[in-house]
Image (tube, rainbow, N blue to C red):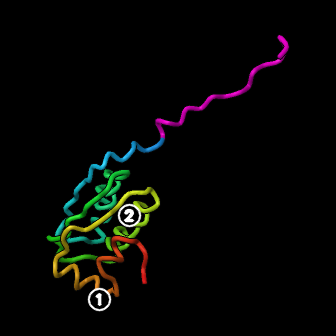
Amino acid sequence: MTDQEMDLSIDLDMSDLSPALNSGEQSNLAIDAKLSGENVEALISDILALRYKDLNIDASAVEQADTPCIEALISASKQWALDGFSLTFSAISENFIAILSTLGLDQSDLETGELK
């Protein structure tokens, strides 16, 4: 390189932009009894706060669930799979099972993010 040439190479360190390696730690999230369209944004925020970790969702308290919240849970499961982490449900209330059944879904649909 001569004195008049400039070095335009850029060294980008993107290591701080990638998620921390999974330490095997599992996060837990208990979701509300009433999952409505009114609180879907809070549900999404709570879930995304635990991204890049294995996540276990406790749905034992769920009494009501609207479609937007079910869609958010399925989307989260898809994202966790893409990120290489697991998303599971430790408990699902009988009401939640009935709601899922009405929609033609079951617990595995929520955990895999793939609909039949």
CA gap between label 2 and label 1 equals: 21 Å
Frontmost residue, 36 versus 77: 77
Question: Which quadrant does the C terminus fall into?
Answer: bottom left
Residue 10 rendering spot, x and y as whole percentages: 66, 28
Residue 108 rendering spot, x and y as whole percentages: 33, 76
Residue at image mark 1: 102
| Crowdedness near tag 1: few (<14), some (14–19) or many (≥20) residues, C-alpha within 10 Å | few
On screen, residue 98 above or below 28: below
User: Is residue 7 a member of the stretch shown in magenta?
Assistant: yes
**Which secondary structure dominates the residues rendered in magenta?**
loop
Range of magenta residues: 1-17
**Residue in the picture at 29% in, 88% down:** 102
Question: Which quadrant does the N terminus fall into?
Answer: top right
Residue at image mark 2: 76
Assess whether mark 1 and mark 2 are in contact (beta carbons under 8 angstroms): no
The tag on residue 48 is: none
**Mark 2 or mark 1: whose residue is earlier in sequence:** 2
